[in-house]
Amino acid sequence: MNAPNASGQRLLRALDAVTAERAEDAVLSVRDLTVRFRLRGGRTVAAVTGADFDLAAGECLALVGESGCGKSVLASALLGLLPGNAETSGTALTDGIDLLAADEKTLARTVRGRRVGLVPQSPAAHLTPVRTVRSQLEETVRALTATGRRARRKAAEDAAERAAFPAGHLDRYPHELSGGLAQRAATALALIGGARLLLADEPTTGLDRDLVDRTADELRRHADDGRALLLITHDLAAAERIADRVAVMYAGRIVEIAPAHRFFGPTGPRHPYARGLLNALPEREFTPIPGMPPELSALPEGCAFAPRCPLATELCATRPAFTAGLACHHPERPRA
Ligand code: SF4
């Protein structure tokens, strides 16, 4: 990217000031979050590299990108749920706690469910197979809230209702649920603690469009109550419906963060990969991005998107820095 002129430098300083202000009142402030998996034979998988973002109270940030780009690993890192061969670095502050440095006892007793809720990507694996949904909801109400014994049943039913889980299925066991019902049960469980930060990892998988909209709206309401929502999704329609900002991840890096109205509006995103994601939608150009994402264990030195990018030049053999919400040497021009 060419060096910015005087007005460009003023804009960058203004953006830095906004970023600093955002960090101060952030529900979550992530800096340089990096995750590496060490594999047998000495191979290293660069799952997440240098993620920087803040999430304010009342805000929904949608994290989008193709499967395997590192979105879910990032969420797992925030909750200390990575496997033993993972190495994390950076910081992720919420409520004065660095989630990346906290020990397991702190995470289990004071973070998971209380400060940070999770709608998991594989809900069936998170439900206890030998207990009914009602029993698991009531147990979670007991563990995470001060609700008295008599009111627990009602609180559990209210959570189910918010997640569009049908009351007639509350006494079923997880193996009796469809994928969509298991998803809704997991969403109900995640809503119970009223956590200030909610991580929703593909929360609309397996749901038909009406239920996608209803679930997305309920998650949005959670953020509207002064909490924050990190929505991890490949469903751009759900992101467009409820997100305030969109972060695009490619090959383990965040390559663009933009206000949702600009990202989805006439101006459009500026990173060629982000533009390609939108153009691939059936309701837009229905043109898939050519090629495949790179192996995270064999990333190139320069921009990882270069082999698929229509704007790549020799300069792209050098990795672009993430500046003012964008990592690209030749960003697309705004559409309008
Ligand atoms: S840095 Fe170059 S290769 Fe990478 S997205 Fe931008 S233009 Fe394309």
Image (cartoon, rainbow, N blue to C red):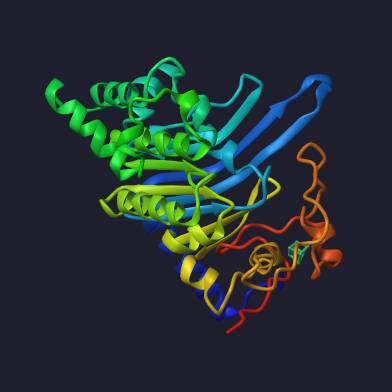
Residue in the image at 27% along x and 51% along y = 226
Residue projecting furthest to the right: 314
For the N terminus, give its image quadrant. Answer: bottom right
Residue in the image at 47% along x and 61% along y = 245
Residue 41: x percent and y percent?
84, 20
Residue 234: x percent and y percent?
59, 52
Q: Is residue 86 left or right of residue 112?
A: right
**Ligand 1 sits in which quadrant?**
bottom right
Compared to residue 243, the image places residue 94 above or below, namely above
Residue projecting furthest to the front: 168
Q: Is residue 324 left or right of residue 250?
A: left
Q: Is residue 148 left or right of residue 64?
A: left
Q: How many marks?
A: 0
Quadrant of residue 89 within the rendered picture: top right
Quadrant of residue 272 within the rendered picture: bottom right
Whether residue 25 appears in this view of the structure is no
Residue 28: x percent and y percent?
40, 44
**Camera-side residue of 286 and 7:** 286
Compared to residue 263, the image places residue 215 above or below, namely above
